Amino acid sequence: MQDGCPENPDTKTEWAENRTDWAEDRTLQANERTFAGWMRTGLGSVAVAIGLKAVFGDFDPTWAAKAVASLFIIAALVIFFFAQRNARRTHARLEDHAAEPLTHTHFATIAAIFAVATLAVGFVLWSL
Protein backbone atom coordinates (compact mmCIF):
# COMPACT_ATOMS: atom_id res chain seq x y z
CA MET A 1 0.00 0.00 0.00
CA GLN A 2 1.00 3.62 -0.57
CA ASP A 3 2.67 5.52 2.29
CA GLY A 4 3.02 2.31 4.30
CA CYS A 5 -0.73 2.26 4.92
CA PRO A 6 -1.65 -0.96 6.72
CA GLU A 7 -4.17 -3.43 5.35
CA ASN A 8 -6.42 -3.02 8.38
CA PRO A 9 -9.52 -1.06 7.22
CA ASP A 10 -10.05 0.48 10.65
CA THR A 11 -6.57 1.99 10.57
CA LYS A 12 -7.21 3.34 7.08
CA THR A 13 -10.38 5.01 8.31
CA GLU A 14 -8.53 6.52 11.25
CA TRP A 15 -5.82 7.88 8.95
CA ALA A 16 -8.44 9.33 6.61
CA GLU A 17 -10.16 11.03 9.54
CA ASN A 18 -6.81 12.44 10.69
CA ARG A 19 -6.11 13.82 7.21
CA THR A 20 -9.57 15.41 7.19
CA ASP A 21 -8.94 16.97 10.59
CA TRP A 22 -5.59 18.33 9.44
CA ALA A 23 -7.17 19.74 6.29
CA GLU A 24 -9.75 21.52 8.43
CA ASP A 25 -6.96 22.97 10.60
CA ARG A 26 -5.15 24.17 7.46
CA THR A 27 -8.37 25.81 6.29
CA LEU A 28 -8.72 27.62 9.63
CA GLN A 29 -5.17 28.92 9.28
CA ALA A 30 -5.80 29.93 5.67
CA ASN A 31 -8.88 31.82 6.89
CA GLU A 32 -6.69 33.79 9.31
CA ARG A 33 -4.18 34.57 6.54
CA THR A 34 -7.04 35.76 4.32
CA PHE A 35 -8.33 37.96 7.15
CA ALA A 36 -4.83 39.45 7.52
CA GLY A 37 -4.75 40.08 3.76
CA TRP A 38 -8.04 41.97 3.93
CA MET A 39 -6.69 44.03 6.83
CA ARG A 40 -3.58 44.90 4.79
CA THR A 41 -5.80 45.93 1.87
CA GLY A 42 -7.82 48.19 4.16
CA LEU A 43 -4.67 49.76 5.52
CA GLY A 44 -3.49 50.29 1.95
CA SER A 45 -6.68 52.23 1.33
CA VAL A 46 -5.96 54.39 4.39
CA ALA A 47 -2.43 54.98 3.09
CA VAL A 48 -3.87 56.16 -0.24
CA ALA A 49 -6.12 58.60 1.65
CA ILE A 50 -3.13 59.99 3.55
CA GLY A 51 -1.10 60.13 0.34
CA LEU A 52 -3.85 62.10 -1.38
CA LYS A 53 -3.73 64.66 1.40
CA ALA A 54 0.05 64.93 0.99
CA VAL A 55 -0.12 65.24 -2.80
CA PHE A 56 -3.12 67.58 -2.95
CA GLY A 57 -2.38 69.55 0.22
CA ASP A 58 -2.77 72.94 -1.48
CA PHE A 59 -5.53 71.80 -3.82
CA ASP A 60 -8.38 74.26 -4.25
CA PRO A 61 -11.17 73.61 -3.34
CA THR A 62 -9.82 71.71 -0.34
CA TRP A 63 -13.12 69.92 0.21
CA ALA A 64 -12.71 68.09 -3.13
CA ALA A 65 -9.37 66.53 -2.15
CA LYS A 66 -10.76 65.70 1.29
CA ALA A 67 -13.84 64.10 -0.28
CA VAL A 68 -11.71 61.85 -2.49
CA ALA A 69 -9.55 60.89 0.51
CA SER A 70 -12.76 60.18 2.44
CA LEU A 71 -13.84 57.71 -0.23
CA PHE A 72 -10.70 55.70 0.51
CA ILE A 73 -11.41 55.94 4.24
CA ILE A 74 -14.93 54.60 3.62
CA ALA A 75 -13.52 51.85 1.41
CA ALA A 76 -11.17 50.82 4.23
CA LEU A 77 -14.07 50.68 6.71
CA VAL A 78 -16.10 48.51 4.33
CA ILE A 79 -13.11 46.21 3.81
CA PHE A 80 -12.62 45.83 7.58
CA PHE A 81 -16.32 45.04 8.07
CA PHE A 82 -16.44 42.39 5.34
CA ALA A 83 -13.12 40.89 6.45
CA GLN A 84 -14.32 40.22 9.97
CA ARG A 85 -17.74 39.05 8.80
CA ASN A 86 -16.32 36.56 6.29
CA ALA A 87 -13.64 35.34 8.71
CA ARG A 88 -16.23 34.76 11.43
CA ARG A 89 -18.54 32.90 9.04
CA THR A 90 -15.76 30.60 7.86
CA HIS A 91 -14.54 30.04 11.40
CA ALA A 92 -18.05 29.11 12.55
CA ARG A 93 -18.33 26.39 9.88
CA LEU A 94 -15.07 24.69 10.84
CA GLU A 95 -13.90 22.79 13.87
CA ASP A 96 -10.35 23.06 15.20
CA HIS A 97 -8.44 19.91 16.01
CA ALA A 98 -4.76 20.61 16.63
CA ALA A 99 -4.61 24.26 15.55
CA GLU A 100 -5.45 27.10 17.91
CA PRO A 101 -7.38 29.56 15.75
CA LEU A 102 -8.38 33.11 16.56
CA THR A 103 -11.75 33.41 18.26
CA HIS A 104 -14.74 35.29 16.87
CA THR A 105 -13.99 38.04 19.37
CA HIS A 106 -10.44 38.42 18.06
CA PHE A 107 -11.66 38.98 14.51
CA ALA A 108 -14.20 41.57 15.67
CA THR A 109 -11.73 43.30 17.99
CA ILE A 110 -9.01 43.60 15.36
CA ALA A 111 -11.47 44.93 12.78
CA ALA A 112 -12.95 47.38 15.31
CA ILE A 113 -9.52 48.75 16.27
CA PHE A 114 -8.64 49.23 12.61
CA ALA A 115 -12.01 50.90 11.98
CA VAL A 116 -11.63 53.34 14.90
CA ALA A 117 -8.09 54.18 13.83
CA THR A 118 -9.29 54.73 10.27
CA LEU A 119 -12.04 57.06 11.45
CA ALA A 120 -9.42 58.98 13.43
CA VAL A 121 -7.31 59.31 10.27
CA GLY A 122 -10.37 60.61 8.44
CA PHE A 123 -11.02 63.13 11.19
CA VAL A 124 -7.42 64.34 11.07
CA LEU A 125 -7.54 64.64 7.27
CA TRP A 126 -10.67 66.79 7.46
CA SER A 127 -9.31 68.99 10.23
CA LEU A 128 -6.07 69.84 8.38
Image (cartoon, rainbow, N blue to C red):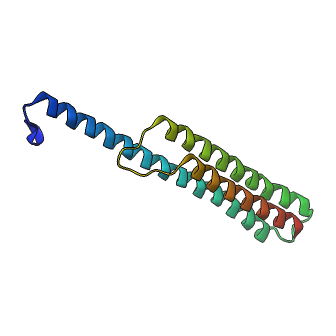
For residue 8, which quarter of the picture?
Answer: top left
The reply, left or right, for residue 48 in relation to residue 34 is right
Q: Residue at x 44, y 45 (%)?
A: 28
Image quarter (top left, top right, bottom left or bottom right) of the N terminus: top left
Q: Nearer the viewer, residue 57 or 22?
A: 22
The reply, left or right, for residue 43 in relation to residue 51 is left
Residue 120, image x, y percentages: 78, 63
Residue 29, image x, y percentages: 43, 49
Q: Residue at x 64, y 60 (%)?
A: 43
Q: Residue at x 54, y 55 (%)?
A: 36
**Does residue 91 sit above or below 74 in this rendering?**
above
Residue 74, image x, y percentages: 75, 51
For residue 11, which quarter of the picture?
Answer: top left
**Does residue 84 sit above or below 123 in this rendering?**
above
Number of marks in picture: 0
**Does residue 74 sit above or below 18 in this rendering?**
below
Q: Residue at x 91, y 65 (%)?
A: 60
Q: Nearer the viewer, residue 10 or 125?
A: 10
**Does residue 34 sit above or below 54 in this rendering?**
above
Image quarter (top left, top right, bottom left or bottom right) of the C terminus: bottom right
Residue 44, image x, y percentages: 63, 60
The reply, left or right, for residue 20 in relation to residue 34 is left
For residue 55, which quarter of the picture?
Answer: bottom right
Outermost residue to the top: 9
